[in-house]
Image (tube, rainbow, N blue to C red):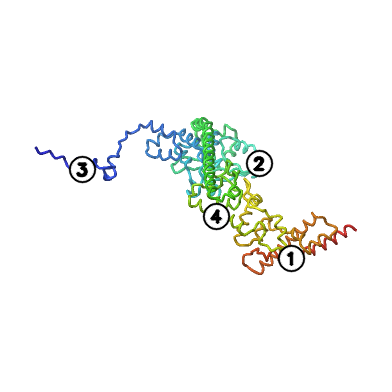
Amino acid sequence: MSSAKLPAKHSQESMEASKPPAKRSRKAKNESSTVINATLPLDAMSFVMQFLPPRSLLNFAFTCKSLRDSLTTKMVVESSLIHGGYAKKSMEELHLLMNVHSMHVPSPLRLLRISNGKSCEFCHGCKVNHVRPGIGVFGCWDCVTIRKLTKPWKRDWARYRHNREKYDAIFNHPRIGFSDYGKKLYFLAHRMKDKAGERIGNLAKWGDVDELASRNEVTNGAIEAYLTDTLHAPSVESYNEFNQAFAEMQQRAERTVAEKAATKRAKKASNKQTKMAKAETMLNDIALLVDERYRDDVMRRSPNRMFLKDEAKISKVPAFIMEAGFVHNLLRDYIITPSKMKKKTMKEMADAINGKVEMIVNKDVLSAGFLPVDSPFKQYLREVTPSSIDALIEQTRSTNFYVDDKSTRFISLVEKDQLLAALASLQNDDLSPVLLTTEPTALLSRSTEYFDSSSLKKIVEAVWRDATYEIQSSNQRCSHKPFEKNDAYYFDLLAKSQSLFRQYLQKLNRYAAWLKD
C-alpha cells in the first residue's frame, strides 16, 4: 500500500519542529513562542495601578481611555508620597493649598502630570522640579517673574494704608492664596486654564483683591460668598478626597521612606565591607611579591576614616591608606577598584615598589654618603635624616585621615639624582640649623651675648626663608625654565644665608644693646 501524503503545510511544520531551536526559522520561533494571554478585567488593572510609581502609573493610565477613567486622586497621591522625590514635594505643596481650600481642585490626570513634570507647563522650555509654592502651578521662575505670570500687591501702597482693616481681612482669609515675600504679596495675574481646559492655580487673582475691598462689607462670610457666587469656587467637600488620601498616606509614606533609607544604608555598609575585604586580599597578594626585607615596612596600612563615613562614595575614596605615601600613590586607584588589579599589574606594582626601595639603598641616600667629607651639610643631614627604610616611612608616614606626599617627593628627587634636594625635602627644605654649625656664622652665633639658643634658631630660620625667597625670585626673573634645586642651589643658598645672618645679627645686637641701656 502506498502511504498517504501529508499536506505541504503540515509537512513543513513537522520538519521545523524536528529541528533544534537554534536552526529553526525566525517565523517558526515566533509562532512557537507566542502565548495567548487572557484579558485582565478592569478591576484587576485598577488594583495593579495602586502599586505603580508615578512614571509607570502615567504610562499605564495613558494606554487606553478605560484606564484613564479608572485613575483616581487617591492613586496619584499614594504613589507620589510612597515613592518620594519631587513628586512627593509637589503633593506636599499642593496639600498646603488644598487644606485651606485656596486653589482649584486638580483632576487625577492633572495631579499625575504634575507628579511626572519636568518642564514649565507655560513656556515648555525651562526645567521645573515641583509646583510653585503658594500658587499651585507648574511654572518656572522666568514665567512667574519676567513673563508676569504673577503680580505683586505691595503693603506700602496708599490704598492699603487707607483701608488697612479691609485688606487685612482679605489677606487673612484662608481661601485667598498668594506667595508672601516681605511686604509684597504675589498673586496670579489672571485666571488660567491648562492645555486640557482645566482651571488651575489659586481661586483669587490680583484684581479680586481690590474688587473685594471696594465692597461695603468685607467679612469672612462676604469673602466666601464672593468666591462662591462670582468666582464659582469649588465646594469645600470637593477637597476631601485629596486631603483624606494625603492624611492617610503621610505616616505610611514617612515610614516607607525611613525603611528605604535604612535599607540603602545597610546595603552601602555591606558594599563597604565587601570592598575592604577585596582590597585587603589584593594588598596581601602584592605584599607576597615585595622584597621580604622591606615588606612589613612599605605595606603597612590603616583603614581610611573618610571611607568609613556614611556619606563617603566608595567609588571615589580608597578603603585603606598606605603609611608609605609613595606606595599609596601607586596603589590608590586599585585600592578604590580592586577588580582592576590583574596578575600582570600586580607583578608590575610589586616590581615598582622594590625598585624604588632598592634605588634609595643603592644610592646611599639616607646615610648622606654621596656628600664629600668636608661638605657643610653632611654632619647635620646625618643627624636628622632617618637611617633606614623603616625610619624613613615612620617619619613620612600617612595617617588614617591624611596622605603624606613627602615620601613621594623624596623618591622623585632621588630618581632625578637630586640627592641633596631629596634630603632637604624631608626637612621641608629648611636647612637653617647648618648656619649654627658652620663657619663663619657659627662663631658669630657664639659671640653674641643677647640671644640664647632658641632665639638664634628663630633668627636663622628667618634668614633662611629670606635667602630662599631672594634666590628663587632672582632665578625666575633671569630664566623662564622650570626651577630645579640642585646641589649648587643649596650651596648658593648657604652662602646667601651666611651673608644675611651677619647683617641681621649686627642690627639685632645694636637693637638689644639699645634696649638694655
What residue would you read off at disc 4?
A: 352
Callout 1 touching callout 4 (CB < 8 Å): no
What residue would you read off at disc 2?
A: 162
* Tag nearer the camera, 2 or 1: 1
Q: Position of residue 296 (x, y in %)?
A: 59, 47
Q: Earlier in the sequence, mark 2 or mark 1?
A: 2
In the picture, the quarter occupied by the N terminus is top left
Callout 4 touching callout 2 (CB < 8 Å): no
Between the C-alphas of marks 1 and 4, the distance is: 39 Å
| Residue 12 - label | 3
What residue would you read off at disc 1?
A: 496
Q: Earlier in the sequence, mark 3 or mark 2?
A: 3
Are there few (<14), some (14-19), or many (20+) residues within 10 Å of tag 4? some
Q: Secondary structure at mark 4?
A: helix
* Tag nearer the camera, 3 or 1: 1
Q: Secondary structure at mark 1?
A: helix
Question: What amino acid does circle 1 point to?
Answer: Lys
Question: What amino acid does circle 3 point to?
Answer: Gln
Q: Is residue 277 left or right of residue 445?
A: left
Q: Position of residue 72 (x, y in %)?
A: 44, 34
Between the C-alphas of marks 2 and 1, the distance is: 82 Å
In the picture, the quarter occupied by the C terminus is bottom right
| Residue 342 - label | none
